[in-house]
Image (tube, rainbow, N blue to C red):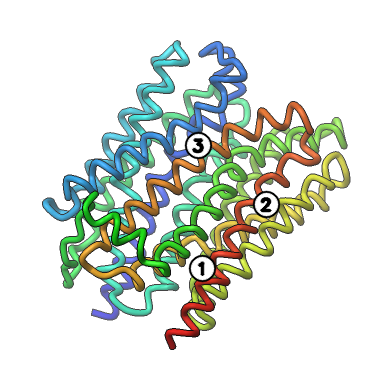
Amino acid sequence: MKRNKWIALLWISIAQLFALSLWFSATVIVPELKHVWSLNNNTEAWVTATIPIGFVIGAFVSSYLGIADRYNTRNIFAASAFLGAIFNLMLIFVGSAYLGIFLRILTGLTLAGVYPTAVKLLSQWFPKNRGLAIGILIAALTLGSSLPHFILVFFTDVNWKFVIIISSVLAFLSAAVMKWFVEDPPMKSDKTPFSFLLLRKVIRNKKVMLANYGYFGHMWELYAMWTWLPVFFYGSFTSYSTEISPWFIPLASFISIGIAGGIGCVIGGYIADKIGRSRLTIISMFMSACCAILIGFTYSHAIWITLLVAIIWGIFVISDSAQFSAAVSEFADIEYLGTALTFQMCVGFMITIISINIIPLLESVIGWQLVFSILSIGPILGIISMMKLQHYESVSD
C-alpha cells in the first residue's frame, strides 16, 4: 500500500503535468494570434481569462450534479483531458477571435474535470499527512502550466500551430496515463456534493471563511503573475539590451514560473506539515507580496536582477496554494465539505479573471514599473486573514 500510493502519486502528477499544458497554450502565442484572429487590446487578455471562466462553470456544474461522486474519478479525468485536447486542437482551424475565445472557455470547462479530480484521487490515496503529496501535485500543475513556454525555448521559429498541436498531444497522453496507468485508490471518499442550502453553513464557519479569504488573496496574485510576467520580461529585457535571443524570454518564463514554482510547491508542502498550514501561507504571501512590489523597480535594469526577483517570486507565489484547500478540508464538516471546496475554488478563479484583465489596463496608465504592485494587495489581505485563522487555531487548542 505504501509503495502503491507513491506510484499513484507519480502517475497522477504526470497526467496533471501533461493536461495543464492546455491552460496557457494560446497565451504564449498571442503575438501570432493578434494577426491571425485580429485581436485588439480588449480581446487579447480574454484569450487567457476565458480559461478561468470555463473552469468556474465546469467546477460548479460538476460539483452541483455530483459528477465526481457518481462516476469513476479516473474516467472523468481521462475524458476531460481528451476533450480538452480536442477543443485546444480545434484552435488551429479558427480564424475568428470570438470563436477562438469560445473554444478557450470549453477548454477551461474540461480542465475543471482534471485539477479537482486529481486532488480527489490524491486525497483518497493519502488520507493523512498529505501536505507533501498535494505539494508535489501542485508542482506538476505549475510545471504543466508553464510547458508552452518550454516548448518555445526549442521551437522559437516554428508556426504557432505547432505549440497548439504539442499541447494537445500532451493532453491526449495525459488521458492515456490516467486511464491505463493509474489505479483506483483503495479508500473511497464520502460523497460531498455542492448545495446552496449548505452554503450558509460554509459562510458561518469562521475558520473556513478565513482560509477562503486567504485563498482569494492568493488567487488575485497568482494567475495574473503567471499570465503577464513573460510580457514584462519582454519589455524589460529588450529595453535593457537589443541582443536578446528569441529563446531567452521563454526560458526565463519557464524557469521563473515552472521550475521555481515546482520547487516552491514541494518545499511548501513539506514545511507546511512541519510548522502548520497557516504559518506557511503567511510566510509565502509576505514574500510574494514583497516581490510583486519590488520587481517593477528592476524594469529595464540588469537582466540577472530581474530574473532573481522573478525566481524568488515564482517560488513563493505558489508555495502556499495547496494549503488553503487542505485547511478547508480540515475545518469544514463532512456534511458541507464539497460545498466549501467548490465555493472556494469558484470564487478564487473568478477573482483571477478580474486581476488578469486589470493588469494591461493599468499598465497603459502607470507602466510596468508599478503595475505588479497592484497584485500585492491580494497577499497582504490574505496575510491578515491567515493571522486571524492562526489566532482562532491557538484559542481552540
**For residue 111, side relative to residue 236 (left or right):** left
Disc 2 target residue: 376
Which corner quadrant holds the N terminus?
A: bottom left
Residue in the image at 69% along x and 44% along y: 374
Nearest the viewer among 136 and 50 is 50
Nearest the viewer among 260 and 359 is 359
Residue type at tag 2: Ser
Residue 52 at x, y percent in the picture: 43, 38
Residue in the image at 61% along x and 65% along y: 284
Which SS class for mark 3?
helix
Tell me if residue 267 can be seen: no
User: Is the residue marked by circle 3 packed among few (<14), some (14-19), or many (20+) residues within 10 Å?
Assistant: many
Disc 1 target residue: 266
Residue type at tag 1: Val
Residue 161 at x, y percent in the picture: 47, 23
**For residue 107, side relative to residue 314 (left or right):** left
Image quadrant in which you'd find residue 291: bottom right
User: Is the residue marked by circle 2 packed among few (<14), some (14-19), or many (20+) residues within 10 Å?
Assistant: many
Kindly report which numbered mark, 1 or 3, lies closer to the viewer in this rendering: 3
User: Is the residue marked by circle 1 packed among few (<14), some (14-19), or many (20+) residues within 10 Å?
Assistant: many
Label 1, label 2: how far apart the Cα atoms are: 23 Å
Which SS class for mark 1?
helix
Disc 3 target residue: 353
Residue 2 at x, y percent in the picture: 28, 80
Report if the CB atoms under discs 1 and 3 are less than 8 Å apart.
no
* Above or below, 84 relative to 293: above
Residue in the image at 57% along x and 75% along y: 279
Kindly report which numbered mark, 1 or 2, lies closer to the viewer in this rendering: 2
Residue type at tag 3: Ile
Report if the CB atoms under discs 1 and 2 are less than 8 Å apart.
no
